[in-house]
Amino acid sequence: MGPSDIVKDEVLASTITPPAGCMMCSEIINLFHAPFDENDNDFPLDIKVSLGQVSERLADDCPHAAWLRDIKYSGGPIPYYEQRELHLYRWKPACNLNVHYHNRQSNVWASTAMFELVFRPEIPGHVGAVRILDESWIDLDVVKDWPSRCIRTHGEKCNKTVGNVPSFKPRLLIDVIQGCVTECDEDSPRFLTLSYTWGSSKNLRMTKAKVDGMKQPGVLRSDVIVSQLPRTILDAIKLTEALGERWLWVDSLCIIQDDDENLQHQLAAMHQIYATSFLTIIAADGKDAEYGLRGLRDISKPRRIKSVVLPIAGDERIAWVEDPDIKERNDKELSYDYRMWTSQEYDFSKRRMIFRDGQVKWECNCSAWSEDHLYRPQEKVTEKVLSGYLGQGSHAKAPSLRWFSRMLWEFNGRTLSYEEDVYNAFAGYNTYLTSIFPSGLVYGHPQIFFDISLCWTSFYDIRRRKVSERYKEDPMHGGLPSWSWMGWKGFIHFPYDSESEVGCSPNIGFTESITEWYAMESPNSCQKERINSVWSRCRKAPAGSMAESWICDEFKPPALTGGSLPSQDSEAVGIPKELPSHRYTCLLDGDVCPETRWYPIPVRQVGSEDEPPSGLHSGYQYLWCQTFRGILTATPDKRIDHREFVPYHLLKNKDGDTAGALLPHNQHESKLLHQDTQVELIAIARGWSTILKDDSFKERESAAPDPETPLTLEEEAVVREAHEEYWSDLFEEFPWMETWEDGKKRKQDGYHVLRIERENGVAYRKGCGFVLEEEWDRVAGTSRVDITLG
């Protein structure tokens, strides 16, 4: 069945009658018939069906019984499996089976692989949506149809890029017809890009000496060059030609690697290159570039997938493709999704053809297609609306540490072969975010919120990045400052400041800057560049400020808080410590997810002719300020942050009284505090925290039962009852003012601080924390000290 048949079938109405006899099979068919929500094409109206006890379904005289007996669930074997209740869920176009139970730690929702109904062309209007895949070869006719179908049905919607970044014409492109690298004469050539991992495979790099030779027609087909190119690049060249395209951009061949000026220019514009390209080929399989784009007949090696087809009653079939075996999965640190360089390539591409887990899929601003699926009859051509700065669709346009954190969380957990490259790997994001954040960024920290951003934290262990053996420059300029998240590998986020953004965390707030920050190129620099952190001044501005960019509304607390569907902007626990009188909503043109804040901040107007600030370049890796310092004792005693479930060490004064809390970067640093240790702290900003006020979250000292030991059914019943009581209380409604006043009592005033250690006159970050105001005033005094942070 070719693409034309798919288009014809997609408009037929559904007329199939569910099979009789087997309850489970009937429910599966019925659920695939469920109508979709008119406001959300991805979710049907009926999404959950109870199938009774597993033992009952195992006793059915139906092909599904053997499947249920041997089925694999996420999380491994289920204790007392046959005595569990079995549920059928529908998520988007697919279904899965689910079993819910409790262990010693939490709820467990064990689920099967997602499956779908196989299309039956002999039945008019059959609701099946998938076709059976060839386990070795991709149907290239289906793949060839995607680009033209996108243009035909989506039009200009899929020409939009993340942030509408300016187009960029690369200096060099591969001409797949002529078989060479060339300078394209077209003003705006339609070119494809390749996103892949280099790994340790052979990979011919373009140099100044090779340019002329690589411009000779046919050179990319010569045995000499083919032997030096990895399989993925060779396959991408042939695929580009098979798709009817002429131009392809590949970094190793289209960037002159030993031309420093050209290299830096194209690295900074990397996001523009991928955003400008018509389509990006994503080579997500394999640990290096030698793996290739497998499954393309007459182009590449065959793929290897396992397509499972299961007969159910009524001559129907369900099907799914098994996930690759864990043993066959690539090392995460080497795979495409965990490599830092591929992050911006993926994020800024407006159309993607993705080769992953042996299959090929399509993504654009309006649709997601795969080779095993028919086009969906209910699909509406609508541009996706996203809350955040990245993804395919429409994006936030106002400065927000919350949205920045979401992006940063995904990016900074990825791996680099040479960790000193982190600044360059972020260069595209930096350019894009500079168009959103006034004054730009300094080492990935927005100037407008600079001191708040210095108090970044992590839910998990993070480790210090180090320069590689390849780095031969001055170690004092390695590009990995300890104060920046760039100096650390792991999942990091900026503070969720309840005083600024509506709907943020109720456990931390920033109320006032206490110093000016400056960036320097070296610890002894005479020249200092002031960092334009203005949030504190904005917070003190009169109501109605910046009316050209923000709508100012009076804030009226509701009568109740809580309930099953709380509103973020009315939840009492997430309101600033002092009851706000107004609330501000950003008015940027075209912002489909407007930012709402408790005070307005400067924004860059969409379409502004002013050039965005360039920010401070990578040489400015040192900070200088004059602030207050103090010495307190970090103790082994811990308190758990009930929002992030991370252990803070209690800080105590010389009398043994609790003065604050300190969060180390990782377990290793935490273990170094196994006994009372004096630590040096510097003040970053005034604010408040709830970390010291909730006694129910002290770290337990008694040993709990082994979490791997399953509960008996009797024990599980007790745990289930406790969980139900907890959730019932959680969604109970309470008087708003009473809840807010209770929350205010937990918000203690103080200073957000960094722990530092000094080396050769330079201070290095060793953690962050909070100190009560009266305790800090006692230990820090009134004199400021010069601090250089590296």
Image (spheres, rainbow, N blue to C red):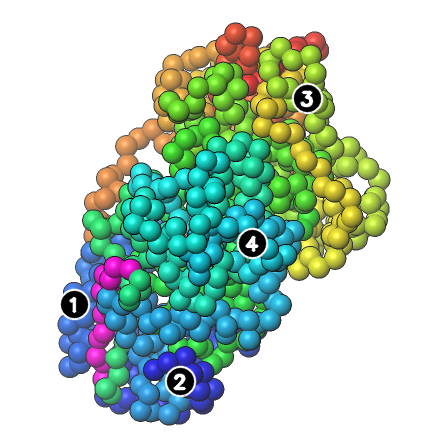
Q: Which residues are magenta?
A: 300-313
Mark 2: which secondary structure? helix
Q: How many labels were placed on the picture?
A: 4
In front of the other: 638 or 740: 638
- Point out the image quarter for the C terminus: top right
Whether residue 147 is visible: yes
Q: Identify the image quadrant of residue 626.
A: top right
Q: Is residue 439 left or right of residue 619?
A: right
Question: Magenta includes 305?
Answer: yes
Mark 4, residues whose alpha carbon is within 10 Å: few (<14), some, or many (≥20)? Answer: some
Q: Say above or below: 197 vs 5.
A: above
Q: Which residue is mark 1?
A: 69
Mark 3: which secondary structure? strand
Image position, residue 483 (x, y; %): 55, 24
As measured in the structure, the alpha-carbon distance from the residue carrying label 1 to the one carrying label 3 is 65 Å
Image position, residue 153 (x, y; %): 55, 75
| Of marks 4 and 2, the one in the foreground | 4
Q: Which residue is mark 3?
A: 518
Mark 2 and mark 1 lie on one chain; the one further toward the N terminus is: 2
Question: Magenta includes 758?
Answer: no
Q: Residue at x 57, y 65 (%)?
A: 158
Type of the residue with mark 4: Cys
Type of the residue with mark 3: Tyr
Q: Residue at x 26, y 83 (%)?
A: 316
Mark 4 and mark 2 lie on one chain; the one further toward the N terminus is: 2
- Disc ID at residue 184: 4
- Point out the image quarter for the N terminus: bottom left
Mark 1 and mark 3 lie on one chain; the one further toward the N terminus is: 1
Q: Say above or below: 75 vs 769.
A: below
